[in-house]
Structures are given as structure tokens and as C-alpha cells.
């Protein structure tokens, strides 16, 4: 792998040639130039458009199957990990969300490092980097007493408003599980199996099938308000059915862990010791050493397209997090967004090793009138990084693309637009 300027440049030129000639999925790459007025004149960056990855290409590991608003497909980080890193290298995502990049990196034998401003992310990511055995999950679920607790908050109050989502007995079990986990967290007694159970429970809180704890509602990565759920219930003439929490947690655990082979477990445990997950701002990560990271694959909040606090309120409630107090970067104004992203790039330039790369994925927002890749290019350049290319992955609109929460092009994107930078 490159560690000097010359070999790093050679690697970039190999990648450029590969993208230009790419036709694995039956279409030829279209090559154009993205031009941006930049600091000292015009930036003209080679831009490659094609279907470079697809979900059909190779089934992603089932450990990824925890939904999260605005997540990307595992094939996206994998594309860059395979081409720009070697086993043992550090791969980092400063906006990790559900942890697609760190998990895919770990599965590829790279050291996963991740950060997110919302503590919910670490709750979703950590347990999948150290997955327990299914038997251990089953035993622990049988040990936790979900029968005792009244519907009371750890602080004292009840949460009867949640009866709009849950059958009374399901809510009783859910409250008991929540209390068990919050108490364990406060007392420092949670182990890897408890953390796994918490992660799975978070992913099952609400959804639109009988695999979730709730009555029919929106997909699990978008919790609706109590008021909206009341309307959904009226419209559909539904009342929450009894759902059995341990049973559903075990079922989902089976789905997540079922395909995990011993060899994959060995790869995960080989990088576990060196992994690092942080909760905090992407622009201030002193825990990540200078010059240590080979590759960053990330996707920031796209201006104010997604309301993370609203979407995650129920998940945050379950984990004892005040959703409204998480200082998520949500800005409407492009210049303010560019300032925030420049601060992040300055931090990325610090942690990247010479020759290391940043693959920065952004969407097409405001009905295509604003191309965020054009807004991102000057941010990276300001931080001293060299722009290498823009890659646009065009795909049929799919279910996973729907996790952007967009059903058309007026509010988001169904393409991945990635700007690749390098520390020279
Ligand atoms: C587009 S999502 C990332 C999704 C991720 N690529 C995945 O596959 O799950 C953006 C993430 O940035 C996080 N975030 C927002 N502002 C942040 C900040 N200032 N520092 C770190 N993370 C932030 C949000 O909580 C959210 O999880």
C-alpha cells in the first residue's frame, strides 16, 4: 500500500483508469469534468458516472441489517476499502450513523474507527463489532425478568402515551427491559450480550411488520410522534397487538448472526482490540492519532434534509438519551454547511496518513439544483487535501435508497456522489 507521494499518485491513476474502463454491470462509464470556482482559480475534477456497485453484486453481510435514517449501502465503503487499503489499515467514519463503514472495514480485516455526535450510534455499532453467540443471547433473554416492572420510568413517571404504539403487556416488558439496561449502564454492569440485546431492541422498537414490538407504523428508522401514530391507528382502525419482546429479539438476533461464519468472527475479533468508537463532534477527535488513518469513508448530514432528532426520538428514549439535546449539525444555508464541513476536513487532514484518502459521499438536494459535491470540493481543498476525482454511482431506486427518506428527486437523491480527496 502507498506510503509515499509517488506510489500514492500511482494508485490514484490506477483507480482513475479502472473507473474509466468500468463496465461490470453492463454500462459504460461516462467521463465528465466537475468545475468549481475555488480559492485560487477554477477547480476542474474528473468525474466518473456509472453503476459501480449494486446490491446484486455481492450480498452484504447480514450484520449490517439494522436500519438507520440516511445510511448508505455496505457496498459503498467496500468499493473504496478494497481499492485503497490493506488488511490492518485504519478505516474511519466521522459521521458513522449505524456504522456501515466501521463494520464493513472490520469484516474486511481493517481496523474500524468511528465517531458520531449521537450516543445512539455507538449503541448500534459496538455490539456488531463484537457479536456474541446466539446461545448466549437466548440464555440472557431468559434470565432478564421482564414481568416485574410496572410501566414506570427509571426517574419515576409512567409512559402510558406509548400505549399508542404498544399493547399494555408489551409496553410493560419493554419498560422492564429498558430499566434493566439503564440500570446496568449506570452501574457499569452491562456486558457484550446485554449490549447486543439493547442494539437489537432499539432496531425493533417500531416498524411496519409483525417483527417489530409496535403496531403498524412507519419504517423503523423514522419514529412518528404519538400524535401522528394516533392518527395512523384511527385511519387503519388498529390497536396494538401483543408482541413478545424476548421472542422478537431472539428472532432478529438469529437473522443478524445466522449467516456469520467462524472465519468472519475470527476476522472481527482480530481487529477488535484496536477498534475505536467515539461519541462527539466530527470536527474534534483528539482520540484519533495524527497521521494514523488510511481511509475515511463518510457521509455527513445533507444540510437539513433529515431531522435526526425527530426520527430517533423513540430510540433515544429507550436508551436514556435526550434526542433534542444532541447537537446534530443541521443547517439550511450552504455557506454555513461549508464552514462546518471545512472544520471536519481540517480534522480529517490531521488524522490521515500521507497518501491516505477521504471518500466523502453527498447527495443531490433541492431537486438537483444544488450539487453538494460542488460545495464539498472547496472545503477539502481549504483543509489542504488534494481532490482526486468525483465518482457518481447511479442506481435504480431501491428499498435501501429509500432509507434516505426520499421517494422522488425533490427532497434528496437516489445516486451516491462521492468526492475523493488525498493527503499528499
Ligand atoms: C448521513 S448520516 C450517516 C449514515 C452512515 N453513513 C450510515 O451508513 O449509517 C449522518 C450522521 O451524522 C451524525 N452527525 C450529525 N452531526 C454531526 C457532527 N457534528 N459530528 C458527528 N456526527 C454528526 C448524525 O447523527 C448521523 O448519524
Image (cartoon, rainbow, N blue to C red):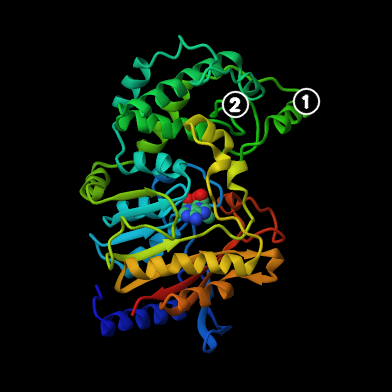
Question: Total number of numbered labels?
Answer: 2
Q: List the residue tagged with mark 1.
A: 234
Q: List the residue tagged with mark 2.
A: 214
Badge 1 density bin: few <14, some 14–19, many ≥20, Cα 10 Å: few
Residue 121 or residue 74, whichever sits in front: 121
* Quadrant position of the C terminus in the picture: bottom left
Mark number, residue 108: none
Position of 91 with respect to 274 (left or right) is right
* Quadrant position of the N terminus in the picture: bottom left
> Residue 57: horizontal and vertical position, in percent?
44, 59
Asked if one can make out residue 187 in the rendered structure from this viewpoint, the answer is: yes
Residue sitting at the far top: 148
Looking at the rendered structure, the secondary structure element under dot 2 is: loop
Position of 275 with respect to 163 (left or right) is left
Which residue occupies 44% across, 14% down? 146
Q: Is mark 1 within 8 Å of ligand 1?
A: no
Looking at the rendered structure, the secondary structure element under dot 1 is: helix
Q: Earlier in the sequence, mark 2 or mark 1?
A: 2
> Residue 9: horizontal and vertical position, in percent?
33, 83
Can you say whether 252 is above or below 310 in the image?
A: above
> Residue 200: horizontal and vertical position, in percent?
44, 33
> Residue 370: horizontal and vertical position, in percent?
66, 70
Disc 2 from disc 1: Cα separation: 15 Å
Q: Is mark 2 within 8 Å of ligand 1?
A: no
Amino acid at each position: 500500500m502507498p506510503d509515499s507521494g509517488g506510489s500514492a499518485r500511482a494508485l490514484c491513476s490506477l483507480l482513475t483508469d479502472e473507473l474509466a474502463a468500468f463496465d461490470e454491470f453492463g454500462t459504460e462509464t461516462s467521463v465528465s469534468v466537475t468545475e468549481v470556482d475555488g480559492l485560487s482559480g477554477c477547480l476542474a475534477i474528473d468525474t466518473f458516472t456509472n453503476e459501480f456497485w449494486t446490491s446484486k453484486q455481492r450480498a452484504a453481510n447480514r450484520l449490517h441489517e439494522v436500519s438507520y435514517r440516511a445510511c448508505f449501502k455496505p457496498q459503498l465503503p467496500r468499493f473504496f476499502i478494497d481499492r485503497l487499503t490493506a488488511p490492518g489499515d485504519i478505516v474511519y467514519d466521522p459521521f458513522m450513523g449505524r456504522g456501515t463503514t466501521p463494520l464493513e472495514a472490520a469484516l474486511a480485516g481493517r481496523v474500524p474507527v468511528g465517531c458520531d455526535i449521537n450516543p445512539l450510534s455507538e449503541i448500534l455499532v459496538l455490539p456488531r463489532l463484537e457479536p456474541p453467540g446466539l446461545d448466549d443471547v437466548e440464555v440472557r433473554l431468559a434470565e432478564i425478568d421482564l414481568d416485574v416492572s410496572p410501566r414506570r420510568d427509571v426517574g419515576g413517571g409512567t409512559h402510558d402515551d406509548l400505549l399508542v404504539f404498544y399493547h399494555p403487556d408489551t409496553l410493560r416488558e419493554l419498560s422492564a427491559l429498558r430499566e434493566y439496561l439503564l440500570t446496568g449502564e449506570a452501574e457499569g454492569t452491562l456486558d457484550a450480550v446485554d449490549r447486543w440485546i439493547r442494539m437489537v431492541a432499539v432496531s425493533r422498537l417500531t416498524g411496519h411488520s409483525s417483527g417489530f414490538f409496535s403496531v403498524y407504523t412507519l419504517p423503523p428508522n423514522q419514529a412518528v410522534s404519538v400524535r401522528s401514530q394516533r392518527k395512523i391507528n384511527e385511519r387503519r382502525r388498529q390497536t396494538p397487538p401483543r408482541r413478545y419482546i424476548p421472542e422478537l429479539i431472539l428472532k432478529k438476533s438469529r437473522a443478524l448472526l445466522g449467516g456469520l461464519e467462524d472465519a468472519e468472527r475470527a476476522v472481527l475479533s482480530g481487529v477488535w482490540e484496536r477498534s475505536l468508537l467515539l461519541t462527539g463532534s466530527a470536527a474534534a477527535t483528539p482520540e484519533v492519532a495524527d497521521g494514523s488513518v488510511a481511509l475515511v469513508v463518510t457521509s455527513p448530514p445533507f444540510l437539513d434534509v433529515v431531522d435526526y432528532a425527530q426520527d430517533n426520538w423513540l430510540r433515544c428514549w429507550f436508551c436514556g438519551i435526550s434526542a433534542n439535546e444532541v447537537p446534530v449539525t443541521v443547517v439550511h444555508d450552504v455557506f454555513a454547511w461549508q464552514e462546518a464541513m471545512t472544520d471536519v476536513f481540517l480534522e480529517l487532514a490531521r488524522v490521515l496518513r500521507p497518501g491516505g484518502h477521504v471518500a466523502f459521499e453527498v447527495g443531490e438536494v433541492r431537486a438537483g439544483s444544488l450539487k453538494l459535491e460542488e460545495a464539498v470540493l472547496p472545503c477539502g481543498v481549504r483543509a489542504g487535501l488534494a481532490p482526486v476525482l468525483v465518482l457518481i454511482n447511479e442506481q435504480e431506486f431501491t428499498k435501501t435508497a429509500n432509507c434516505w427518506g426520499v421517494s422522488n428527486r425533490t427532497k434528496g437523491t437516489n445516486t451516491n456522489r462521492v468526492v475523493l480527496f488525498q493527503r499528499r
